[in-house]
């Protein structure tokens, strides 16, 4: 009986953990393909908001493609209205954040994360809030921000 209670408590604790996902914020997820092992790889969101370029690594997470085969990244509430993309980068200075000198090692996948104040802002089909917009097909989704797959750039 004690083992069952301990397992139940563990599962509740894990479900509250940010590695499992924060139910209060929207996540973007996808697969990672071709990335070499043995590098300090992380995720960051880069883009254009309020008339200037921005980079946010505050939700940066270590990428371990052998553990999960992909990633789930919480979208920061601090990002304003704008267009963004997720990048995989090598943390050259090992400060745990995307900063000057870090090297982006993922290819542009042609998909944008769009944070819109109103429907139709930036692109047709965009809804208020977070969306994925595919620049090749001109399709968007605001329901599930999935299939944001990233490939190694071969650098």
Image (tube, helix red, strand yellow):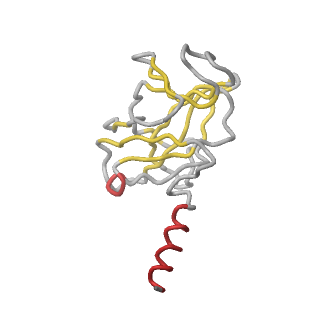
38 to the left or right of 94: left
The image position of residue 11, as x and y in percent, is 49, 68
- Depth check, front residue: 6 or 29: 6
56 to the left or right of 8: right
The image position of residue 115, as x and y in percent, is 62, 29
- Depth check, front residue: 84 or 6: 6
**Count of marks placed on residues:** 0
Considering every residue shown, the one lying at the far top of the view is 124
Considering every residue shown, the one lying at the far front of the view is 1
Quarter occupied by the C terminus: top left
151 to the left or right of 27: left
Residue displayed at 50% across by 56% down: 20
Residue displayed at 69% across by 22% down: 51
The image position of residue 64, as x and y in percent, is 38, 54
57 shown above or below 114: below
The image position of residue 81, as x and y in percent, is 67, 27
94 shown above or below 12: above
Residue displayed at 57% across by 27% down: 114
- Depth check, front residue: 105 or 112: 112
Residue displayed at 35% across by 43% down: 32
């Amino acid at each position: 009986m004690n083992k069952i209670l301990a397992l139940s408590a563990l599962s509740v604790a894990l479900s509250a953990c940010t590695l499992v996902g924060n139910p209060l914020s929207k996540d973007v997820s996808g697969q990672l393909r071709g990335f070499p092992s043995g590098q300090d790889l992380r995720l960051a969101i880069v883009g254009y908001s309020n008339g200037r370029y921005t980079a946010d690594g505050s939700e940066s997470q270590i990428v371990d493609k052998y553990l999960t085969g992909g990633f789930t990244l919480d979208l920061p509430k601090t990002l304003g209205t704008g267009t963004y993309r997720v990048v995989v980068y090598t943390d050259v200075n090992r400060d745990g954040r995307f900063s000057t000198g870090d090297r982006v090692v993922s290819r542009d996948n042609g998909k944008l994360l769009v944070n819109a104040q109103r429907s139709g802002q930036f692109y047709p089909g965009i809804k208020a809030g977070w969306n994925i917009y595919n620049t090749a097909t001109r399709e968007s989704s605001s329901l599930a921000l999935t299939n944001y797959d990233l490939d190694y750039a071969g650098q």
